[in-house]
């Protein structure tokens, strides 16, 4: 049976969402937001903890030294730098433009060797002017001398005529005055020549000042000016004028400068033997001696400056190199009883529960090693057992180190 089209009505109510379904959907959304807000901070905390756990602690290590039987003992250790006693920044005495540079970094120079030249056009003109003034004064002297010669002839003739009664006394006086005047003019001209000579010397010195020479034998360690730049003995303040041309170091004057804590300065004496070790050559022990203890202290750092001389210089020793030094005691006789195996810095020794131990570094990991300590030797301590010469020990690092921890060695 066919249904009439008018009897079919759209049921829009069937598309409506019920209250129960609406409340259920809202609850699910809120739960999702809450879950996200809780999980994100936890994830961040976990990531930070993982990053901190994976970060390696940084430690400073030092190699245990071999124990010598008898001999000299280290009373004190210090660190410093190689410094030359003769270092000079070469500058010009005048302000001028650089016209020539005849050196480079690393150039060996001799005393008096030409380093650079400045523009000398202006001072050369002043020199030529002074020489012209001198030549003019000298020509004037020659003219006055010729006139004086003639005046003396006239004076002699006037004297003869006056004696003969032919000429009056007035004529004789005039002839005498003319000769005396020319003599005075010649003296004045000579003084003018002397003044011109002085101006010539001044102008010549200005010309010489445009030539820069090495004041002593040494090596150029810094090239501070180029052709075309302006140099001046004083700072111009604008940043476009150089105050130096080169820095020269006398390598034969290299020495060591260290700061010693004032609490230990009593252990340092003039001419005391010292062993130096350059950071660049850690296996090279260089014999030295104390040259002087500077008689003043740094109140801020509580240190006293000590200068140490090398017993023998070497071309590998360069200025500003880092160096560690050990101040040695007098020769000691061989001690009786058991000998220590090695000496280590006191900072490497730790204790726990009355037991002394150190941390050794092997393949990027630390190893807990129990030791038996002996007598102190300055800043070092004798190790009777547990450490062998050449072992790398942690001398500075976090207090939370544990056996087997991976570490990063501070360079």
Image (spheres, helix red, strand yellow):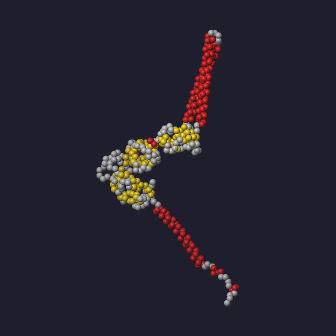
Residue found 65% across the figure and 80% down from its top: 12
The residue nearer to you, when weighing 207 against 267, is 207
Percent coordinates x, y for residue 85 in the rendering: 46, 42
Percent coordinates x, y for residue 70 in the rendering: 32, 48
Farthest left residue in view: 336
Residue found 57% across the figure and 40% down from its top: 99
- Left or right of 105 on screen, residue 289: left
In this view of the protein, can residue 225 be seen by the observer?
A: yes
Quadrant, the N terminus: bottom right
In this view of the protein, can residue 235 be seen by the observer?
A: no
Task: Name the image quarter holding residue 294.
Answer: top left
Percent coordinates x, y for residue 125 in the rendering: 60, 34
Rendered position, 182 above or below 228? above
Task: Name the image quarter holding residue 11.
Answer: bottom right
Percent coordinates x, y for residue 164 in the rendering: 62, 9
The residue nearer to you, when weighing 82 against 25, is 82
Rendered position, 106 above or below 400? above
Residue found 61% across the figure and 10% down from its top: 163
Q: How many marks?
A: 0
Rendered position, 17 above or below 145? below
- Left or right of 168 on screen, residue 208: left
Farthest bottom residue in view: 1
The residue nearer to you, when weighing 100 against 247, is 100
The residue nearer to you, when weighing 409 against 335, is 409
Quadrant, the C terminus: bottom left
Residue found 41% across the figure and 55% down from its top: 61
């Amino acid at each position: 049976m066919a249904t009439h089209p008018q009897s079919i009505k759209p049921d829009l109510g069937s598309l409506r969402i019920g209250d129960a379904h609406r409340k259920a959907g809202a609850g699910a959304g809120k739960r999702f937001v809450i879950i996200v807000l809780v999980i994100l901070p936890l994830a961040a905390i976990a990531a930070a903890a993982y990053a901190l756990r994976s970060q390696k602690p940084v430690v400073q290590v030092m190699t245990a030294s071999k124990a010598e039987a008898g001999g000299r003992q280290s009373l004190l250790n210090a660190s410093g730098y190689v410094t030359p006693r003769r270092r000079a920044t070469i500058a010009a005495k005048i302000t001028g433009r650089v016209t020539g540079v005849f050196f480079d970094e690393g150039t060996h120079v001799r005393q008096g060797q030409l380093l650079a030249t400045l523009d000398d056009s202006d001072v050369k003109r002043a020199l030529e002017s002074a020489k012209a003034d001198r030549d003019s004064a000298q020509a004037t002297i020659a003219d006055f001398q010729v006139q004086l010669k003639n005046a003396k002839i006239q004076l002699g003739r006037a004297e003869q005529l006056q004696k003969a009664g032919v000429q009056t006394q007035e004529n004789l006086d005039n002839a005498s005055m003319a000769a005396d005047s020319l003599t005075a003019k010649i003296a004045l001209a000579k003084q003018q020549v002397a003044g011109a000579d002085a101006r010539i010397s001044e102008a010549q010195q200005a010309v010489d000042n445009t030539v820069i020479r090495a004041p002593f034998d040494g090596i150029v360690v810094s090239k501070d000016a180029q052709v075309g730049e302006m140099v001046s003995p004083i700072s111009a303040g604008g940043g476009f004028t150089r105050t130096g041309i080169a820095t020269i170091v006398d390598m034969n004057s290299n020495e060591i400068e260290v700061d010693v804590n004032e609490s230990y300065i009593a252990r340092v004496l003039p001419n005391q033997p010292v062993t130096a070790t350059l950071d660049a050559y850690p296996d090279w022990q260089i014999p030295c001696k104390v040259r002087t203890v500077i008689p003043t202290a740094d109140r801020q750092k509580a240190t006293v400056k000590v200068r140490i001389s090398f017993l023998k210089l070497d071309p590998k020793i360069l200025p500003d190199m880092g160096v560690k030094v050990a101040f040695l005691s007098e020769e000691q006789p061989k001690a009786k009883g058991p000998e220590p195996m090695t000496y280590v810095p006191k900072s490497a020794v730790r204790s726990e529960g009355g037991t002394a131990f150190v941390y050794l570094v092997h393949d990027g990991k630390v190893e807990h090693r129990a030791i038996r300590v002996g007598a102190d030797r300055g800043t070092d301590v004798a190790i009777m057992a547990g450490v062998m010469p050449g072992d790398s020990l942690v001398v500075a690092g976090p207090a939370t180190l544990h056996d087997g921890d991976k570490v990063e060695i501070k360079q």
